[in-house]
Image (cartoon, helix red, strand yellow):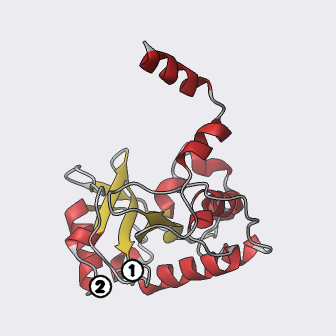
Amino acid sequence: MRLSIFLAAALLLPASAQNRERRGEPGRFDSYLLSLSWSPAYCATQGGAWNDAQCAPGRRFAFVLHGLWPQYDNGRWPQFCSEEPGLRNAQSMLDIMPSLSLIRHEWQKHGTCTGLGAEAYFALARKAFESIRIPARFQAPKEYLVVSPAEVAREFQAANPGVTAESLSVQCSSNSLSEVRICLDQNLRPVACEGQRSCRAPEVRMPPVR
């Protein structure tokens, strides 16, 4: 009975209170998860229809930075660790992270848990993004690609000798490739990680860069 009352009370908490319950301590985490999003797949969805900065004609984005997320070794993660202010000039990240709302969200949810200030966090996120070499045929394809998740993983490993099968996962949504995720240590070297499951679809589509 007491457990039922506790659960009911928890469900009545406002979102901000629930977030506080899940907060970690800034700077206390084990590794990073670098998330690279396939922009053409996002722009093909309803969500991409209103994001002019990312999806307007002539914005030829391929893989973009979704985020750099602090992680624990058990596969969980801290989030919303403080209310430190974000970037003074968020537009400075738009070349690799083409959404101001995403930049704000990533700082509030993930960046605040690193123990870094916003300027240092986004400089580190850019360094992590630039440390990963995108395989040649995924840099700016002009036609639809149909590939297996295992094939995407193999090509990323071949282009990045330090990346192993244990440090990489391929994500999909509605039979389209959505993200490639790579686990990194705090010095941005690839490491094995827990809790990352790759897409199980036999094949995924990659809409072309337009």
Query: Where 178 falls versus 208 (above or below)?
Result: above
Left-right relation of 16 to 126: right
Q: Residue at x 27, y 53 (%)?
A: 199
Query: Where 205 falls versus 128 (above or below)?
Result: above
Q: Is residue 50 visible?
A: yes
Tell me the quarter of the picture where residue 181 sits. bottom left
The amino acid sitting under disc 2 is Ala
Which image quarter holds the N terminus?
Answer: top left
The amino acid sitting under disc 1 is Ile
Q: Seen from this angle, which residue lies furthest right?
A: 88
Tell me the quarter of the picture where residue 143 sits. bottom left
Residue bearing mark 2: 159
Is disc 1 placed on a helix, strand or loop?
loop
Is disc 2 placed on a helix, strand or loop?
helix
Q: Is residue 210 visible?
A: no
Q: Residue at x 52, y 85 (%)?
A: 127
x, y (%) of residue 89?
78, 75
Query: Where 153 falls versus 13 (above or below)?
Result: below
Crowd band around label 1 with a 10 angstrom C-alpha radius: few (<14), some (14–19), many (20+): some
x, y (%) of residue 17?
65, 38
For the residue pair 197 and 55, the one nearer the viewer reads as: 197
Q: Which mark is residue 134?
A: 1
x, y (%) of residue 90?
74, 71
Q: Residue at x 25, y 79 (%)?
A: 157
Q: Is the residue under label 2 in contact with that under label 1 (CB below 8 Å)?
A: yes
Cα separation between marks 1 and 2 = 7 Å
The numbered mark, 1 or 2, whose residue comes first in the sequence reads 1
x, y (%) of residue 137?
34, 78
Q: Residue at x 54, y 70 (%)?
A: 27
Tell me the quarter of the picture where residue 111 sits. bottom right
For the residue pair 185 and 101, the one nearer the viewer reads as: 185
